[in-house]
Image (spheres, coloured by chain):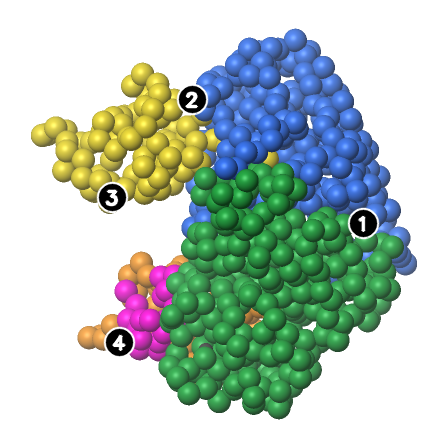
Chain colours: A green, B blue, C yellow, D orange
Amino acid sequence: WDGLQHGLNKEQIARYSRQIVLHSFGVQAQAKLCRGSVLIVGAGGLGSPAALYLAAAGVGRLGIVDKDSVELSNIHRQIIHREADVGVHKAVSAAQSCRALNSSIQVEVHCEGFTPANAVQLVRQYDVVVDASDNAPTRYLISDACCAVGRPLVSGAAIGTDGQLTVYCHGADGPCYRCLFPEAPAAGNCARCVDAGVLGVVPGVIGTLQALEAVKLLSGIGEPMSRRLLVIDCAAGRFHSVKLRAKSASCVSCGTSPAITAASLPSYDYAAFTGQAAANDAAPKPLQLI
Amino acid sequence: WDGLQHGLNKEQIARYSRQIVLHSFGVQAQAKLCRGSVLIVGAGGLGSPAALYLAAAGVGRLGIVDKDSVELSNIHRQIIHREADVGVHKAVSAAQSCRALNSSIQVEVHCEGFTPANAVQLVRQYDVVVDASDNAPTRYLISDACCAVGRPLVSGAAIGTDGQLTVYCHGADGPCYRCLFPEAPAAGNCARCVDAGVLGVVPGVIGTLQALEAVKLLSGIGEPMSRRLLVIDCAAGRFHSVKLRAKSASCVSCGTSPAITAASLPSYDYAAFTGQAAANDAAPKPLQLI
Amino acid sequence: MVKVRLEFSGGLDLLFGNQKAVEADIPQQSGHQLTVAEAMAWARDNLLTDRPELFMKGSSVRPGVLVLLNDTDWELCGELDALVADGDRVTFISTLHGG
Amino acid sequence: MVKVRLEFSGGLDLLFGNQKAVEADIPQQSGHQLTVAEAMAWARDNLLTDRPELFMKGSSVRPGVLVLLNDTDWELCGELDALVADGDRVTFISTLHGG
Ligand SMILES: [Zn+2]
Ligand SMILES: [Zn+2]
């Protein structure tokens, strides 16, 4: 009965039937998802919907990276975790939710966080990378590792009521993060959700769109957001897509003679380059309201 | 310590601290969410993220309406349900996930579905209504009930790789569904997800945006999508917002002398008007792939 | 000839050979400006590849289709009689019911 | 005077009195067309309400800010020397890191 050589079993056909009957998607695209793998860096506000929708869609192997534990103040936006998971490692909690949604896929947890020491080796194991991190040094690190190993990168970010989405390191001319921002912003210019706040549903929108882009990249269906930046203003209800530069031949990461390679990346000093350590949303100061 | 008279307790302040520190949102907007209520009609592809994000955001009381049970073929897009919930009533399963996320809110289940007999009485109990249904007769019914009782309606829809979002029945000039579409489309023009298929993440994007609109309506923050229709093409990665007409004085539902009122609505024949019964995604024909 | 961009969304693209947008040169009667009604009829007669009843009903659009002129609901521009000039966009969006 | 729409996104609006867009009339030197560099300096001198170092560094934009001319990355239009005409939009977007 597998005359189309898609390699899906009967349970998979039943489970994904609503995507398979879709003419513009179909069984071959679903089979690519089921054979594909995605690394999600960060199991927070962006990673929550990204991981859930990729698990539900049937991506064969998901890797989830984090290093923090769930806190109550995360849950207003990090819907992959439940109250009962407070104190549990985020990657473990997220993996558990993905498996409960879809036991037929493989979910791998990486609890040590994403570091210069493990970045290249982690990225190498997956087809597509989702940047669901929350700080500038990690964003440069993820982009560099994707350049070094040659993986497309779905990048999302959110703060306040603003969100941004793009795909880096894709195709012949897609830029990387450093092509756009060769010089890191000063540490004082980098607002974090823990300080500036974020409306919970904003990373929800962006993270879900990150899952969409990963599905498009894996399945080969649709036009990925390469060389385009989607900018959303959730308060105004404005969605705006702008055209980005091509990759730069002189980029230290993805140019014709890159200084940052798989070999040199582990010794690159991201804290010095960005002037800040990889931060996280853990251990907030208690909020004082008079 | 409640000098700002927001009425939030210490646990709420800790839980929602990332929204409260956000200048453009703050403690008063959070307090409005915590005092507010939303009715979600449909615990499927749209209702899944809508319910999760509204529960996480701290909406004080959520009502979830459905009449079907979870099937395996739902889960590729209906991420509020888990494999273990197959066979469980969708409203019950969804409520369970919302409570696991946030035990401090009230979640009410309405298992009989949304019908002309119960529509007015259900809508009356909530501040905002989310149309997360999947068929034309139910969409007219929800809009009529919101007109009759005077509630803003967040309407979302998705099929294939297309999605649409708008807010009906809002403010002085916001139109209702009938203002835009006074005559129902022929039954043959209404594709359903079960037949035409849907990429799972597409209702994910729209449902998350429905939660955003409900948050904006309840909190009074931002500009709701009234008199605007957001059209998304997920394959192309296009987001487009268009300008809609004002409400019509001659509308049978929201006009100056409406024919459809709280009293007359229960006897209105929606099946005859739309030429179809309220369908659902249950009991699909087994998908045959040669 | 009037240069008009015709756009089809919400499944209507399936009726137009899977095209989501067509740059059209639509002939106009001399001395008259092109109307949305004429642009619509031209699209039906020249571009439609499938089942015209899913696009029009009589001389207007079928129920459940929203018509926009330059991203604005045609109800705000004069509906069938709205005038279409060079560079304008006419969009047809089928309302969706799925979820 | 050149009529330009200046847009601020990703938190930069906070530096411009919470305005996300300003319709500006920017004076130009006679015989010269306005450049993005001049529009940016004008915005800093006339609109900025707070901490100029969060907007510019030297005579260009600070690291981490993307500049667009009519929705296109300025790198594709000539960066600081790109010419700005009546009706153009210049957008400044701060890259976000949160999640
Ligand atoms: Zn590069
Ligand atoms: Zn009406």
Q: Residue furthest left?
A: C30
Q: CA distance from mark 4 to mark 3?
A: 40 Å
Tell me whether marks 1 and 2 sit on the same chain. Answer: no
Q: Which residue is mark 2?
A: C63
Residue type, mark 4 in image: Gln
Mark 2: few, some, or many residues within 10 Å (few <14, many ≥20)? many
Q: Do the numbered discs 1 and 2 sit on residues whose CB atoms are within 8 Å?
A: no
Residue interval drawn in magenta? D65-85
Residue D88, how many percent across, how many down?
33, 61
Query: Is the residue A171 above or below the residue B255 in the image?
Result: below
> Disc 4 vs disc 2: which is toward the camera?
2
Q: CA distance from mark 2 to mark 3?
A: 25 Å
Mark 4: few, some, or many residues within 10 Å (few <14, many ≥20)? few
| Residue A78 image-quadrant placement | bottom right
Mark 3: few, some, or many residues within 10 Å (few <14, many ≥20)? few
Secondary structure category for the residue under label 1: helix
Q: Do the numbered discs 2 and 3 sit on residues whose CB atoms are within 8 Å?
A: no
Q: CA distance from mark 4 to mark 2?
A: 56 Å
Residue type, mark 1 in image: Leu
Relative to the observer, which residue lies in front, A168 or D45?
A168
Q: Which residue is mark 3?
A: C23
Q: Which residue is mark 1?
A: B101
Quadrant assignment for ligand 1: bottom left
Q: Which residue is mark 4?
A: D29
Residue type, mark 2 in image: Pro
Chain where mark 2 sits: C
> Disc 1 vs disc 4: which is toward the camera?
1
